Amino acid sequence: MAKKFKNELENCEIEMDDMKYEDTIFRSCTFIYSGGAFTGFKGCGFEKPYFTFDGAARNTVELLRGFYHGGLSRVVDEIFEDIRKNPPKRPTSH
């Protein structure tokens, strides 16, 4: 996982897959997630962020959208309730 820290970024595209950002300020940036390894943010600030999904991540969003509008809205609600209640596990150091 690549790591970037102590930056101020504005009006740019941010690839999230396999990246970790620390102590970075993002202003009006577009975050692109394609389904890769967990991405981390530590001590970052976000002003007017926009998120978009590509590849496998986009497929997952479309699957959830289909569930929600296809009679399985309760399943999607349960997934998001689980997300709200259970923060991500921190990766262990090797």
Image: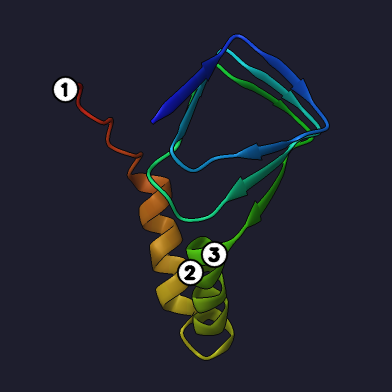
Query: Between disc 2 and disc 3, whose residue precedes?
Result: 3
Q: Is 88 located above or below residue 2 in the figure?
A: below
Which residue occupies 49% across, 82% down? Answer: 67
Image mark count: 3
Seen at 60% across and 9% down, the residue is: 6
Q: Residue lying furthest left in this view?
A: 94
Residue 68 in percent (x, y) is at 54, 80
Q: Is residue 66 left or right of residue 50?
A: left
19, 69: nearer the viewer = 19
> Percent x, y for residue 7?
66, 13
Instruction: Tell me: residue 9, above or below residue 51.
Output: above
The residue carrying mark 3 is 55
Q: Nearer the viewer, residue 89 or 17?
A: 17
Type of the residue with mark 3: Gly
State if disc 3 and disc 2 touch (CB < 8 Å).
no
Q: Position of residue 50 (x, y in %)?
A: 74, 45
**Residue picked out by circle 1:** 94
Element carrying mark 2? helix
Can residue 22 be spotted in the picture?
Answer: no
Q: Return the mark for residue 60.
A: 2
